[in-house]
Image (tube, rainbow, N blue to C red):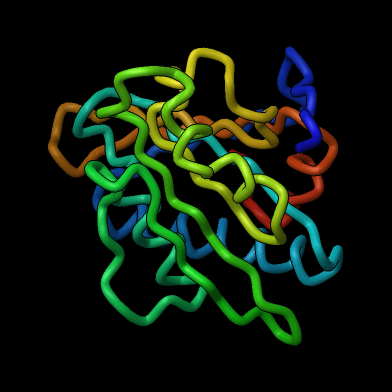
Amino acid sequence: MTQTKAIQSPLTAIDLYCRQEADTASFAKQLAASFEHFLTKQPSSHLNISLEGDLGAGKTTLARYLIQTMGHEGKVKSPTYTLCEPYPLQLKDQVITIHHFDLYRMRDPLEWQEAGFAEHFDVPGICLIEWPEKAEGTLPGLDIQIQLAAGADENERTIKINALTPSGVCALPKLPLK
């Protein structure tokens, strides 16, 4: 597996404020359109995306909206106990897979590799990783970091997106810069 070295400082930073869950869904729709554009323009591409934030910050909610907007028609399960849920999707003339990881319950940083999940980081598509810090540096480099924080109201969110690699920058141009 090829290690992608993430650039230390963000190449692109976007800050958003979502007042209600519908705003988060709308943001996921914009993100999905941007990712689809990137993946179809660069066949066989792959993005590693971290979803970071405290419990209840909205990581799984954002992942669910993103996966459904990109074409998954069934239920999007939380991978809390399985560590990974794959979602194969048809994008124009190619099949990609979104691998949704939740590392919260991981007991050892190498657990995801021992389960054979490292191979998912080399296939066309996206790896969405909740709780990447649980892997303690054993994950391949990240292209995009998404940090979520809950607001005063249970549906309020602040979202900060950092593109960490040139691929991450290319995957974000359709997003509104706020």
**Rendering coords of residue 157 (x, y %):** 31, 36
Q: Is residue 131 left or right of residue 11?
A: left
Query: Which residue is located at x 57 percent, y 15 percent?
Result: 137
In depth, the one of 111 and 89 nearer the eye is: 111
Query: Which residue is located at x 61 percent, y 81 percent?
Result: 90
Question: In the rendered view, would you say 129 is above or below 37?
Answer: above
Q: Quadrant of the C terminus?
A: top right
In depth, the one of 151 and 58 nearer the eye is: 58
Question: In the rendered view, would you say 11 is above or below 175?
Answer: above
Query: Which residue is located at x 39 percent, y 49 percent?
Result: 84
Query: Which residue is located at x 48 percent, y 22 percent?
Result: 110
Question: In the rendered view, would you say 11 is above or below 118?
Answer: above
Q: Quadrant of residue 68?
A: bottom left
In depth, the one of 123 and 24 nearer the eye is: 123
Q: Quadrant of residue 154?
A: top left
| Direction bottom: furthest residue | 93
**Rendering coords of residue 109 (x, y %):** 44, 18
**Rendering coords of residue 74 (x, y %):** 31, 78
Q: How many marks?
A: 0
**Rendering coords of residue 1 (x, y %):** 76, 37
Question: In the rendered view, would you say 148 is above or below 68?
Answer: above
